Image (cartoon, helix red, strand yellow):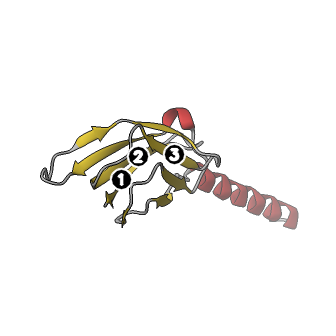
Amino acid sequence: MSFLKTTTVAVALTAGLLLSAVAQAHPKLLSSTPAEGSDAAAPSKIELHFSENLTTQFSGAKLIMTDMPGMPNSPMGVKAAVAAGGDPKTMVITPAAPLTTGTYKVEWRAVSSDTHPITGNFSFKVK
């Protein structure tokens, strides 16, 4: 095989591998505020930071109070607005009312340009 053909094949294979890797990428939750497992004062908003830009119309989250004083294991949905943050990789959950003492779980769904939904959850406590 000539040098030109070998180089062309190598470039084509490399480009194919790179495009395949990009197409297979999925958003990953990198961090949240409050952090998973944290125990702190009630946040006025909850921020989720992902590895990729989110497609906001297909991404979202639910906030659930899973335990409250005197009523363990009593999950209850919390009214909250979910919106894109100032950064396209950020999702912001803003509770409609201040969070009370208890344990909360955030269930999220993130979709990026590859259109594959990725889901996850994390919990935190409010003092």
Q: Residue 7 carries which label?
A: none
Tell me if residue 124 comes above or below residue 62 in the rendering: below
Quadrant (top left/top right/bottom left/bottom right) for the C terminus = bottom left
Give the quarter of the image for residue 38: bottom left
Sequence-first tag of 3 and 1? 3
Sequence-first tag of 2 and 3? 3
Disc 2 from disc 3: Cα separation: 11 Å
Where's residue 98, x and y in %?
38, 45
Where's residue 99, x and y in %?
35, 48
**Dots 2, 3 in contact, CB < 8 A:** no
Give the quarter of the image for residue 124: bottom left
Say whether residue 127 is left or right of residue 49.
Answer: left
Quadrant (top left/top right/bottom left/bottom right) for the N terminus = bottom right
The kind of residue on which mark 2 rests is Trp
The kind of residue on which mark 3 rests is Val
Q: Nearer the viewer, residue 109 or 85?
A: 85
Disc 3 from disc 1: Cα separation: 14 Å
| Residue that mark 3 sits on | 92
**Dots 1, 2 in contact, CB < 8 A:** yes
Q: Which of 125 and 87 is in front in this view?
A: 125
| Residue that mark 2 sits on | 108
| Residue that mark 1 sits on | 121
The kind of residue on which mark 1 rests is Asn
Q: Nearer the viewer, residue 110 or 37?
A: 37
Tell us which disc is closer to us: 3 or 1.
3
